[in-house]
Image: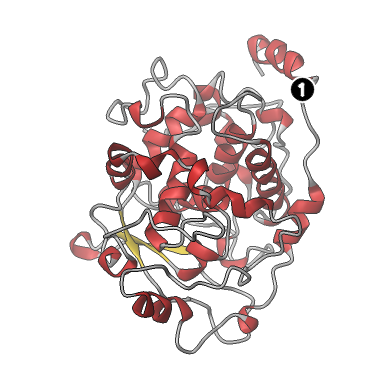
Amino acid sequence: MSSRLEIAMTRKRALFIAACLGGALIYMLMPSCAVLVDADDTLCHALADAKGGVVDWPVGERWYEDPKGGCHVFDNVMMNPWWADPDARTYLDGFGLAQGHNWGDMQREDPTAYDEKTYEFNTPLGRTYDGYSNIVYANPEGIGLDRGRSLGDFEYYDTFLKWASAYVAKKTYRVNGSCFRSCQTVGSYTCAIARTVSGAFRNDYMDLYQTFYYEIDAVWRASTIVHEVRHARDEVLHTGGNGCPRRSACDRKWSNSSSNTYEMLWLAAYYWTPEDHAFITPARRARAQALFETLRQSAFIDPVKWDLQSLALINEIPEFYVYEAACSEDPDKPHRCLVLAN
């Protein structure tokens, strides 16, 4: 580890907050999809019944338990600047949504619709925008960030969050909406949030499923997007088979630099933003912390040595974490990546 990094890490140690393992455990012990699977796919029918109006989606149907209800607020209209800004919605569409299929059936005509009792967005596209908002507004430039620069331009992308926003835009496939629930079988413990497909004749795309919109929170949606984009144009696949609790989404080790590693890097960068950040509230930060710990414990076969403290400078020296940390097993012995994410 460089002396510059060691000195800066020492300054950060006093600021480190222990990860919330209680919150993480909730996400590790997800219930069977058997209690949620509908033969008729609830969302498809709810959208048809809405006829372009308010989607009657039962707020209580969640894939996880949130005892304090804190995660619901992430979809509140007042917490998402894109709601009153058409330019912001155009910017968000630039992450692959504009080229995606099926959004016309997912209420593209009015993604700003919300439940007047809870003030939560209730259209699938609106809640997808909320996911992307966590990627965009986590960096101070927001929609003013130039995503067209080279990913190696760390003079401009001087935090990991800036770099990640450009990375997601540059590396994504088209993003399709889907009203279907995608579970392996009735009674399965595995439901898909999203999937990435590569095929012949440029038949490359990402699909988002019913679970993505209504059964996970917006911070989780954002980290899922980062995860899926790592699969896309970089064509990085999972390496762990079914060897860890995440099963088909398992990686053998951190240094494979796969989707789970990138997802954790983004969550760490999100967590390590300044405490007075205009967009990232304490509740959002806590969610990032819990999701990070869940992945650290459940997404790899080999134990992960990188923790939040060892990633504390990710928004100060982003090039180190992209070019070295992402493919080094030991935080004390980092080395240069053989293949760079450019």
Q: In this picture, is 78 found above or below 333?
A: below
Judge by depth and name the residue closer to the eye, 8 or 78: 78
Res 174 visible: yes
Residue nearest the observer in this picture, 138 or 269: 138
Percent of width and height locating residue 4: 64, 10
Q: Which residue, given by chain and number where applicable, does mark 1 sit on?
A: 15
**Total marks placed:** 1
Look at 46% across and 39% down and name the residue there. 135
Image location of residue 102, percent across then percent down? 28, 67
Residue 328 appears in view? no
In this image, 22 relative to 225: left or right? Answer: right
Residue extending farthest to the left is: 201
**50 relative to 296 in the view: left or right:** left
Judged left or right of residue 239, residue 113 is: left
Of the 4 image quadrants, the one containing the C terminus is top left
Measured from the top left, where is residue 32 in percent x and y?
A: 67, 78
Residue plotted at (31% across, 26% down): 146
Q: Secondary structure at mark 1?
A: loop
**Amino acid carrying mark 1 in the image:** Leu
The residue positioned 35% from the left and 64% from the top of the image is: 177
User: In the image, is 312 to the left or to the right of 54?
Assistant: right
Q: Position of residue 281 (x, y in %)?
A: 63, 36
Q: Residue furthest front?
A: 116
Q: Crowdedness of circle 1 by 10 Å Cα count: few (<14), some, many (20+)?
A: few
